[in-house]
Amino acid sequence: MARLTVDTAAAENGARSFVFCVYVSGHGWGHATRANQIISDILKLPAQHKVYVISNASDFIFQGVIQLGAIYRQAAIDAGVVQPLAYTVDRDQTISNLKSFLERRPETLVSEVEWLKQVKADCVVCDAPFLPCAAAAKAGIPAAIASNFTFDEVYKGLCEGDELDQEIRQMVEITIDDYRNCDLLVRLPGAIRIPSFDDTEQLVPSTPISTTFPSDIKKGVVNGKMQLPCTSQSNVRSKRKNSTYERRIVDVPLVFRKYRTEREQVLEELGIPRSVYSTHKILLLSFGGQALGKGGWVDPLPQGWICIVCCAPDGVTLPRNFYRASRDAYVPDLTNAADVVLGKLGYGTCSECIGHGTPFVYVPRPQFIEEYGLLKLMQDQGSAVELKREDFEAGYWGEAIELAATLSGTCDEPGRLVGHNGGQIAALTLENFVIEWRQSNRSVLDQVTEEESTLIPVAI
């Protein structure tokens, strides 16, 4: 019988190189931006790990980590959420896509298991597709979630008391079961309840949600924790029958991308004259392509302001005092250069606003439940001002922008400031997780190796 051996001494010293397969949802840029930070920190570890990044998002968004050595593979690995606009959800199409994805689940699962074995994967990390968690279990390797939410709660949040609710709940149970194949949750700031690891209602907000948070919840740094990183035991049992690893939740500090280029250089490269940016305040519109000018408004900016627009389609003519950022612009540079950011409550935008101390004006998207954990994060660690959707679309931005500009953009209690090294801590946590999981599950690894040896001749 061919045995899989673990060099314990090398592993304990962090010397062994592992193969990490990081599955990243194609829904929104926030998953990719934070995954990129964690991937880059994994690649910087002394052990020189190998990283595959798998997503149905374009490789364009992963170019930074590809240049560092990550290997990209495009695959349909999650159903995501359909958003006609940055702040709306198409409920019917989202449910239809999830149903179709689950119908293809058996063949997709077989394909992913085969691929994981082919690349000799040591660990699956999900942000936050659910099917790869089940694939990892069938491949006999550990799996972890690195996210502030999982899609079961997002889909559950689409229940509206109609005939679709029963079907939604049945599909939600499948997603939870897949997530339960993970033995580690690296929980990012701004989290909502993640049922596959924590089925209590103590983490706020939970579903059903409210924008009013209970006053009896002790205010911590993030996620109700008083210090970070913080390790706790999951109160939900693993789906893996033979696993002996104690499932854990590790709350980590902020995972975000930091700016690289100084403010003046960024603005000048955008073609904004010094005479303009030195005499005007700057708004960053972090979601573009929103039919700017539709509805007849002329200038939504307060007097003395200019605006930089991300992702504005080439065919869109921008209003006066608006400047177009290039498609490949490094958004943290723009966030650092801006006085205020206007966008949606997504993890990438929130974390980068907090990390750079930039006040935030947000357009609510109440159908997307992740928003409520991020709103609490912004209230505790940053500065956030609501701009109603109808006011955004009508061009009535001025009052919200001017109010945000008076705020600090950061937590006003030094003792509760969240750390900015979440990516490094997440990378080290994942590395140690693989070492500990392998030591704890040697019998499982031996069984997988024995099964493979009956199919593949092994040279003795």
Image (tube, grey):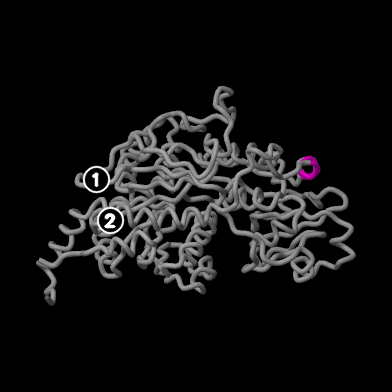
Q: Residue at x 46, y 57 (%)?
A: 427
| Residue 320 screen position, x and y as percent | 82, 60
Q: Which residue is mark 2?
A: 438
Q: Where does the N terminus fall, quadrant-wise? A: bottom left
- The answer, for residue 104, to whether it is visible in the render is no
The range drawn in magenta is: 401-406
Q: Main secondary structure of the magenta part?
A: helix
Q: Which residue is mark 1?
A: 244
Residue 217, image x and y in percent? 54, 26
Q: Quadrant of residue 117?
A: bottom left
Q: Residues within 10 Å of mark 1 (few under 14, many from 20)?
A: some
User: Closer to the camera, 183 or 36?
Assistant: 183
Q: Residue at x 53, y 70 (%)?
A: 63
Judging from the image, what secondary structure is the residue with disc 1 in?
loop
Q: In the rendered view, does 73 fall on the left or right side of 445?
A: right
Residue 287 picture location, percent across and down: 64, 55
Question: Which residue is outermost to the bottom?
Answer: 459
> The residue tagged with tag 2: helix, strand or loop?
helix
Q: Give the quadrant of the C terminus.
A: bottom left
402 falls in the magenta region:
yes
Residue closer to the observer: 127 or 188: 188
Q: Residue furthest front?
A: 9
Q: Is residue 93 left or right of residue 33?
A: left
Residue 43 marker: none
Which residue is pictured at 74% across the width and 67% down the height? 266
Q: How many marks?
A: 2
Q: Amino acid at mark 2?
A: Arg
